[in-house]
Amino acid sequence: MLLLGNDIVDLQEDGVAGKSADRRFMTRVFTENEHQTILASPQPDVMLWMLWAAKETAFKIVSKLGQPPVFAHKKFAVRLLAQHGTAENREIGVEVKYEDIPARVTVSRQSHYIYSLGHAETKKPGWKHHVFSETQEVSEKDDLSENSGEVTFSRNELKNVTHRQSLQVRFYCKQALARRLAVHPSRLQIIRPRIANKSLPPYLLLDGRRCGIDISFTHHGRFLAWCGSVPRHCMPA
């Protein structure tokens, strides 16, 4: 099974600019090697949030492999593999390692946000997968009923929806999955359980059953993002 994680950072949100000058934050979140990578970058704040997004992405992946670990950012060590592009449109490839678990992550900087998408394969026999990833800028005035494809939510789905962005990103994720699977959205449920006041990774139900489709979603500021890995045998012919 192909496990995914993703993260997004709105570069215009309060507290984003100038963070590389916050020594306490830098020491708490980043290893010494990561610290040097950030300070050596021509845009240290951008590199900081790119590495941050990679760590957040890896945490989501590792959390699907067993009991989610306590999230100490510094324990998710980022190794830069490649980088290319311009200042306004940069992409880096990294490996993020937590203990002995590696995840491959690609982080891209767009004009107004940073987006990270990563994956790891389980040790179980795998299938070929179709991976999709989408982002969208939204506002508080967005009407979820427009072109909804009759997306609805069950009580179980709504248990852990705490604000509008949580609902929006689930809404668009279900739309994307329904299109790719060629099914009515009512057959899909996105469940995110909680144990002892701790949220566990979301999973997908198709016709009320778990399936080999993995999903991840994220939101920050004005931006939402969602992704999925769909086994090829689940795709319509």
Image: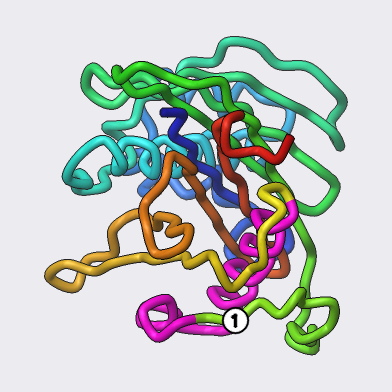
Residue 32 in view: no
- Residue ranking furthest to the top: 81
Q: Is residue 84 magenta?
A: no
* Residue at (42, 76) in percent of width and height: 157
Front residue of this view, candidates 179 and 64? 179
Residue 188 in view: yes
- In the rendered view, would you say 156 is above or below 95? below
- In the rendered view, would you say 144 is above or below 134? below
Residue stretch rendered in magenta on the structure? 154-179
Q: Is residue 173 magenta?
A: yes
Q: Position of residue 231 (x, y in %)?
A: 55, 32
Name the amino acid, label 1.
Answer: Thr
- In the rendered view, would you say 30 is above or below 24? above
- The quadrant of the rendering that contains the N terminus is top left
Pointer 1: what residue? 152
Residue 33 quadrant: top left
Residue 43 quadrant: top right
